[in-house]
Image: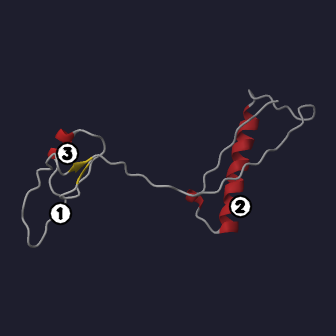
Amino acid sequence: MACKACVVSIPGDHEALLRKIYKPYRHLYTNYSCYHGARSVLNTYLSNQYRTDMVVYEITLDSKLINVNPGKLWIRRASQNLAEAMTLADECLVDIEFNEIKSGYRLRHS
C-alpha cells in the first residue's frame, strides 16, 4: 500500500498499519501531518524485472567406469567444487564480481 499524498508505503494491504506511519519527509514550506485517508491510499505492487543469462552444462559420467552412487559423498562434493570453480572462471572472463554470479548443481540419473 502507498499513500499518494505523502508517498509513504508499506508491504501488505492493512490500512491500520499504514496509519501508524508518519510522513517520511519534512518540507521547508509545508508542515502538515498526513493521515493517509481512504482517497489517498493506493494498493500497488512494487517489482523489478531482471534480464539475465543462464548457462546449463550437462556432464555424463559412465557408471561402468566411475561409481556414481548418489549416496556417496564424493560426487556431491565434486559437483559443488566444479560449480564453484566455473563461477570463479566466469568472474575472470566476463569481469563480474563473484557474489553476483550464482552457481549450483543437480545430479540426474538415467
The amino acid type, in three-letter code, at marker 3 is Leu
- Secondary structure at badge 3 equals helix
Label 3 sits on residue:
18
Decide: is 72 above or below 42: above
Name the residue at 64% across, 49% down. Answer: 103
Spatial CA span between label 3 and label 1: 15 Å
- Secondary structure at badge 2 equals helix
Residue closer to the observer: 85 or 22: 22
Spatial CA span between label 3 and label 2: 48 Å
- Secondary structure at badge 1 equals loop
Query: Which residue sits furthest right?
Result: 64
Picture coordinates of residue 52 (x, y %)? 60, 57
Query: Which residue sits furthest front?
Result: 39
Name the residue at 70% across, 49% down. Answer: 83
Residue closer to the observer: 1 or 23: 1
Label 2 sits on residue:
89
The numbered mark, 3 or 1, whose residue comes first in the sequence reads 3
Label 1 sits on residue:
25
Spatial CA span between label 1 and label 2: 46 Å
The amino acid type, in three-letter code, at marker 2 is Ala
- The reply, left or right, for residue 78 in relation to residue 27 is right
